[in-house]
Amino acid sequence: MKRIIQMSMMLCVCLLPLSAQTGTKDKPETEKNSIYLEALGNGIFYSVNYDHLFSRKKNPMIGVGTRIGISYGTYNWFWGSTSLTTLPVEAYFSYGIKCCLELGLGYTSMFEDNYFSGLITLRAGYKYRRPEGFIFGAGFLAFGDSYGITFPVPHLSIGFTF
């Protein structure tokens, strides 16, 4: 069952339309799609993410985007070794063109052997997008469940846009 979910999520990411638009000299527009590696983010320990920023035609400074990611690892805990797969999804608000403030709300599904759980995520971060395609992000993330919200955890990301 775990393999089926992993393969279906990877297939969904691969089949998304990947069209990038560029702006004119008078009105520059950043690339719309990003792939990046994130440490200590929505995927708990790490995740590989695909990000899509929707059109900014009315106001190029304000954008809305979505992202989906995946991570997998085998971890040794106090009670033994277990495999953990996370599937984070998020919708976010972005303000800026090259240097962006991002505020996001998401959900991270966690699959651990035969156990499933999920966490709500709240994220505030900064993302720098170079015209050549390099991106760098940093910020803070809080997880929430039925017991409440955790303290903010820092995260870093690095990747490229197209």
Image (cartoon, rainbow, N blue to C red):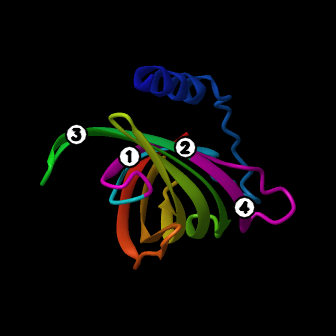
| Disc 4 target residue | 63
- Residue 132 visible in the current orientation: no
- Residue plotted at (69% across, 44% down): 22
Q: Which mark is residue 68?
A: 2
> Spatial distance from mark 2 to mark 1, Cα to Cα?
9 Å
Tell me which numbered mark, 2 or 3, is placed earlier along the sequence.
2
Distance, label 4 to label 1, CA atoms, is: 23 Å
Q: Which element carries disc 2, helix, strand or loop?
A: strand
Q: CA distance from mark 4 to mark 3?
A: 39 Å
The residue at which mark 1 appears reads as 47
Amino acid of disc 3: Thr
Q: Which residue is mark 3?
A: 82
Which sits in the foreground, 100 or 49? 49
- Looking at this rendering, what residue extends furthest in the right direction? 58
| Element type where label 3 sits in the image | strand
Name which residue type carries label 1: Ser
Q: Nearer the viewer, residue 121 or 47?
A: 121
The residue positioned 45% from the left and 55% from the top of the image is: 135
- For residue 56, side relative to residue 17 (left or right): right
Q: Looking at the picture, which amino acid does disc 4 mark?
A: Gly
Q: Counting other residues with Cα less than 10 Å from the Cα at mark 3, is it few (<14), some (14-19), or many (20 or more)?
A: few
- Region in magenta: 42-67
Q: Earlier in the sequence, mark 4 or mark 2?
A: 4
The amino acid type of the residue labelled 2 equals: Ile
Quadrant of res 39: bottom left
x and y percent of residue 103 in the render? 60, 70
Front disc: 4 or 1:
1
**Residue 1's x, y, as percent?**
45, 22
Q: Circle 4: is it few (<14), some (14-19), or many (20+) Cα within 10 Å?
A: many
Q: CA distance from mark 4 to mark 2?
A: 17 Å
